[in-house]
Amino acid sequence: MYQERIPLYTEIERRLDSKLLVYVTSDRQGFEAVIAQDVIDLFIDQLDSIGIVDKISLLLYTRGGNTAAAWNIVNLLRMYCDDLQVVIPHKAHSAGTLISIGANSIVMTKQATLGPIDPSVNNPLNPPIPGASLQETFPVSVEAVKGYIAFAKEELAIKEDCSLSQIMIALSEKVHPLVLGQVYRSRAQIKMLAEKLLQNQITDQAKIQQIISFLCSDSGSHDYTINRREAENGLGLNIIKPDMELYEVIKSVYDNFSEELGFRKFFDPRVVVNENNGEYEIKRGLIESISGGSDYFTTQGRISLVEINGQQGIQNEKLFEGWKHEN
């Protein structure tokens, strides 16, 4: 379906007077993908094919991912252009929002949303998920830790050092102290990165700090969504509203890759067995441009029906997972 999108990409480039690069991470249930460091070399290849130009527009769809990778992506894009623009057809949350505020301008459709950038820490020292494998752990939200301490101090009005110490001890018994240390470092880092990135579209330092406070904590929840009107009027970001013709082209691009990545499709293993002899391939991410072709992250596997303790079960054998390229 990449070939079907090329005429749409050409039209977007014409209307924005820009070179277009597309980055999509899937949020299909069971086949989610996130912004990660493994895309940096792919971005380099795509950008080398585009060359150094005046303006690049990054069409972005993502629910988030690695903060450091998002920072790297913005800095890399800026090495190839003077004017960086992000085009949001639908969702650009968390680390996607971090990329967006690093642009000079943001094109948002009517349904486009940004989100808070408060990070979560997830490493082997995180609390394990009960009943899950040893490798599965709970992500620890930076703002959740801050909220726990604020609840004790402000809502419960605990002031005594001894009582506060007991609260911290109880927290450290549930969350490893090294994870708590990383939480503090992550919170400081995200604010520093956001401040640097916002300077590309906001000059008022007080306004920058106001935006950072909202995106990092004042929004109240990581699930909070920021629509176009709030992004422009509430936060003061440099938002561009596409006209109806441009909107229709952007929406067509979204509909096309949404269909290809199966955003609205439920993965039914029994259907896969009955219709495809158990073989499947699911695309979970895209990085593509007109000149650079399409890089796509895919998972291939084989589903088998097996007997487990007298009952029919499902065995999922993963055959391949990684990036492929299509010219």
Image (tube, rainbow, N blue to C red):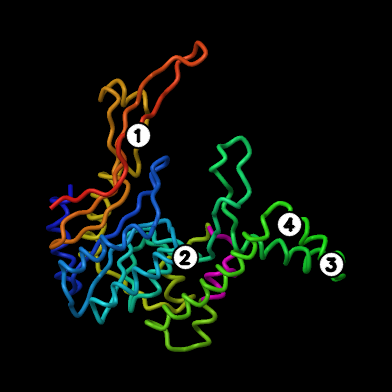
Earlier sequence position, callout 3 versus callout 2: 3
- The residue at 43%/58% (across/down) is 64
Image coordinates for residue 220, horizontal then vertical, percent: 60, 64
As drawn, the residue found furthest toward the bottom would be 204
User: For mark 4, what is the residue?
Assistant: 171
- What's the CA distance linking mark 1 and mark 3? 52 Å
**Identity of the amino acid at label 3?**
Ile
- What's the CA distance linking mark 2 and mark 1? 37 Å
Q: Is residue 298 left or right of residue 170?
A: left
Q: Say what secondary structure mark 2 lies in.
A: loop
User: For mark 3, what is the residue?
Assistant: 158
Earlier sequence position, callout 1 versus callout 3: 3
User: For mark 1, what is the residue?
Assistant: 318
Earlier sequence position, callout 2 versus callout 1: 2
Is residue 221 shown in magenta?
Answer: yes
Image coordinates for residue 177, horizontal then vertical, percent: 68, 60
| Start-end of magenta stretch | 212-222
In the figure, residue 181 lies in which quadrant?
bottom right
Image coordinates for residue 24, horizontal then vertical, percent: 31, 55
**Identity of the amino acid at label 4?**
Leu
